[in-house]
Amino acid sequence: MHRNLGTEILRVMQNRTVVKVLLIFTLAFATSNLFAKESKKEGNEGEGDLKTEIKEFIDHHLQDSHDFTLFSDKEANTHYGLPLPVILWDNGLKVFSSSRFHHGETVAEVDGNYYKLYHSKIYKTDASGTINYDEEHHATNTKPLDFSITKNVVSILLIGLLMFFMFSRLAKSYKKNNGIPTGVGRFLEPLVLFVRDEIAIPNIGEKNYKRYMSFLLTVFFFIWLLNLLGMTPLAVNVTGNIAVTFALALITFLITNLTANKNYWGHIFWMPGVPTFMKVVLAPIELLGVFIKPFSLMIRLYANMTAGHVVIMSIIGMMFLFKSWIGSPLSFGLSFALSILELLVAALQAYIFTMLSALYFGMATEEAHH
Amino acid sequence: MDKLINDFSFGLFFWQILLFVGLLLLLRKFAWKPILEAVNNREEGIKNALESAEEARKEMQNLQADNERILNEARAERDGMLKEARQLKENMITDAKSEAQAEADKIVAQAQATIESEKKAAIADLKSQVAGLSVEIAEKVVRKELADKDKQLELVESMLGDVTLN
């Protein structure tokens, strides 16, 4: 297998899902721009307000949140949900409940410091909660280091517990039942075997695949279950969060490069079988490829999941805009069909992330063959 | 890009790394290793069972072939033995026959020899008895003949006549 940046880009291009989702993404951008223009035009009318509200709602849902709001009543100005712990590092550890922000409406006072929630981020303010802006309307207040247990962290914890519960039970059922899984294990075992036989062994090879199995299995089920959790009415967007995909891609990057053999580095810095001049030209390109590979993993998962959430929520939002006997059922049908597509994408993205990780591990451990 | 960097939350990144690595380690110890081991063992077991079944089948075939061979051998041996016995019987009969023949011949020959010698003895005996009787008769005849002188002379003369005739 000869690898370079070109094949990597080609692979991304060939990946029809990515192209398709990019199309959807572009469409979503186009429509959102349309919405934006229209809302400016009819800024004072009620429909424009609704559009802005839908847009804000979608934006809010894509973001992480400091409290687990299930639904809210805007007119009564009440939120139903759970407050979550806020953990700040600001000259010492500060822990308090997110209920003290009152969803960004009030300033939380902790040990003589004042914090305010503004656009899902915590800023340090004065007692009255003033936010200062620069020319581009970005807040300039200092941001304390925020280690809060946010909605996404809670989702990760939940999925982690669920995975541990499911798979440790599967492991135990083998012992109890003489090597044959029982109950839900009968559903889970083929999935585990799928990761082993269809992802790990073909891409890494019989010899080396065992040491990567733990990561591949964990990342596959982790992404898949979080994608599915995002499809529930809880609508958490964990795998569509850049920090999460960055962390996952970083782990793939670290594992790839820490377990890489001499042959792999040889192919990067001194490509065998090409003229010396080309070796010099190829080295920086290949080195760039080392970083682009996990970067593409990060962006692919982020873009796919975010795009899916944007499209589905936009189409659901359209129901409230049309308010007609033709338009609303139409957008309902469309959102239903897209939800089914998203179920597929949820599994597909988990598969692609795992498969490409396995491919990179395979490249890193490939033996020289001349 | 600007939006991506703006959206990036270090806290979430920290928790994600921490929880994911923790989950990875826990699952590796309590789930993935035992699961993959159990599956591997089962697959090995199935493979071994299939192999041993195949082996048993082959062994069975070998056994059957062996049986067939042994049976054939036994059959051939039996045939051989029967043939041999038949041969032996025939030989014995022929031998007995020829021996009996020889014995009979011998007995016959002996009998013939005995008969011959008996005959000879009888003839000799007869001869001697005839000779004795002849002599006695001759004596008696001679005695009677010689009772008179003339007769004696006559005899001598006839005898002499005979001699000259001879």
Image: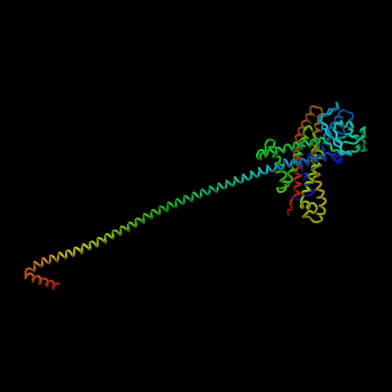
Left-right relation of A11 to B159: right
Q: Is residue A296 visible?
A: no
Residue closer to the observer: A287 or A258: A258
Question: Residue B123, how many percent across, how many down?
Answer: 20, 63
Report the number of numbered marks: 0
**Vertical comparison of A299 with B100: above or below:** above
Front one among A46 and B5: B5
Residue A26 visible here:
yes
Tell me the quarter of the image containing the C terminus of chain A: bottom right
Please, which residue is most extreme toward the top here?
A76
Quarter of image, res A76? top right
Q: Compare residues B91 and B34 and report the one nearer the observer.
A: B34
Foreground of the two, B52 or B158 = B52
Please state the horizontal and vertical placement of residue A83, each as a whole percent of the image. 83, 32
Give the percent coordinates (x, y) of residue A196. Answer: 71, 43
Image quadrant in which you'd find residue B29: top right
Percent across and percent down for residue A231 are 77, 34
Q: Residue furthest bottom?
A: B164
